[in-house]
Amino acid sequence: MNSGFQFLDYAIFIGYAIMILGIGLWVSRDKKGQQKNAEDYFLASKSLPWWAIGASLIAANISAEQFIGMSGSGFASGLAIASYEWMAALTLIIVGKYFLPIFIEKGLYTIPEFVEQRYSTNLKTILAVFWIGLYVFVNLASVLYLGALALETIMGIPLVYGVIGLSLFSAAYSLYGGLSAVAWTDVIQVIFLVLGGFLTTYLALDYVSNGEGFIAGLTAVYDAVPERFEMILDESNPEYKNLPGIAVLVGGMWVANLYYWGFNQYIIQRTLAAKSLAEAQKGIIFAAFLKLLIPLIVVIPGIAAYVMINDPEIMNRLGAMGQMNVPSLESADKTYPWLLQFLPVGLKGIAFAALAAAVVSSLASMLNSTSTIFTMDIYKQYINKNADDRTTVNTGRISAAVALVIACIMAPLLGGIDQAFQFIQEYTGLVSPGILAVFLLGLFWKKTTNKAAIIGAITSVPIALYFKVAPKGWSTSPVFIDVPFMDQMGYTLLSTMGVIIVASYVQRKGRDDANGIEITKELFKTSPKFNIGAFAIMLILAALYALFW
């Protein structure tokens, strides 16, 4: 397979790699006469400014799932998949205003640590083990697989070698430097991924318009497939099962987003490392504004590719580019790598560096958070309670390395998955509603008890499986219902909250739990800058949904 890479492309990519490694190792260095302690390694010394927090949030979030998976979903279903990004902007505002004040006030290192303070050590351990398993077997493995798939499609690098190369790249600085190395390199990574993403979008639309530019290309794409710019799908749409109409705005999408942005260690850890609550909240608003732009660089290219492939005139113009497999609805995740071949020399290197930045930054973030949870919630709890800082930091590095090795073994086994973004959302959705129910009631309902939370967490899985698995073989039975997975998440959340509420009342007869959190108006007071930013984001979102309803 001919990747079309020239010397300049390789030089740009190698330069990017050297720069990231150099910055990562430089910020990782120990200060003269000082040994890294746990706060230095896991929370970047609590010194991150707002712009680094916002950039790092996006770099950790945008990975192969988006560049590869979301472009594939854009190719298959259109702009509707952008709801994951645009609704995330609104979710970030909620997290910044209502969740962060409580987390930062408690001085947390990890999300499971909150569970211990609010509920019990037993529940914390259950959730810590779950998160470690999820990060290693689903998140790390899927990001490695999708990143290696891109390398294979673009450059012909065998999948296994791609997995190993990406894992070694991310490990080279993140294992030694901890969150500080991850966060500061993320600032550079996010510049690459946004710039490279915009270049790919611009040139794809330029091809569609036969050289007339971005706006003309976007207009041509909209005119060619206006149905693919509908944000709210009706039941006749074949992708309705993934994006079930109005439920995207008022249903299960909230479960996915609140769980991910509010209680996901490798996301929320950046905000816990802020200089102050106000700085963390400014970073959240910055990330929310960036989120509004992401569909332009990961979804629009997929729609443009669909138009290109289905227009004989465009394909004739691009006839010389027929060296790679042309994506189909059955191979949608090849869309973004397929587009990269059309970039000119030099820009191809930048776009490829953007894709690598998205993959490597997410890998580094997940590794750091996996090691943080294992070290602080498992190792220091059960194995070595009196571990000094040196031992704690070394344990974090070793556990991250072990997680990476396991993920490398798992990644090639994910071959054959189509629309990987949807796959990840769907299977994470089996457990996220139960965890979200435990957190929401733990934060905002003082009567929630530990025993009720454990009962709810356990029963949420069979409830989710009832909606997920039963219809496959029992859809004709009146006992079971067959609903889209996003609705499944919404129903599971409400059912689990009901179980926890009933169990709490049975146990304590309506009395407040001793560990209940005292909620005051002052706790949720935000600065004028945060309020203005939040209002602006909500206005933009209202305009976007009104335009593409």
Image (cartoon, rainbow, N blue to C red):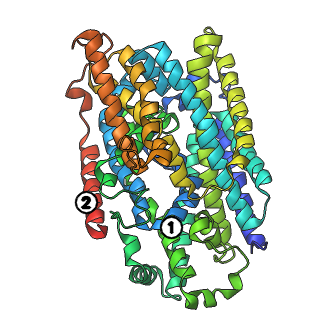
- State left or right for residue 483 relative to residue 195: left
- State left or right for residue 435 relative to residue 23: left
User: Residue 338: horizontal and vertical position, in percent?
Assistant: 64, 71
Residue 327 in view, yes or no: yes
Crowd band around label 2 with a 10 angstrom C-alpha radius: few (<14), some (14–19), many (20+) = few
> Residue 440 versus residue 239: which sits nearer the camera?
239
Q: Quadrant of residue 219?
A: bottom left
Q: Quadrant of residue 367?
A: top right
User: Residue 351: horizontal and vertical position, in percent?
Assistant: 62, 66
Q: Quadrant of the N terminus?
A: bottom right
User: Residue 221: horizontal and vertical position, in percent?
Assistant: 44, 80
Q: Quadrant of residue 159?
A: bottom right
Crowd band around label 1 with a 10 angstrom C-alpha radius: few (<14), some (14–19), many (20+) = many
**Residue 542, label in figure:** 2
Kindly indicate whether the residue at mark 1 contacts the one at mark 2 (C-beta within 8 angstroms): no
Mark 2: which amino acid?
Answer: Ala
Residue 92 in view, yes or no: no
Q: Secondary structure at mark 2?
A: helix
Give the residue pinned by disc 1.
Answer: 76
User: Residue 450: horizontal and vertical position, in percent?
Assistant: 38, 15
Disc on the earlier residue, 2 or 1? 1
Name the residue: 36% across, 67% down: 236
**Residue 164, label in figure:** none
Mark 1: which amino acid?
Answer: Ala
Give the alpha-carbon distance from disc 2 to disc 1, as whole Å: 25 Å
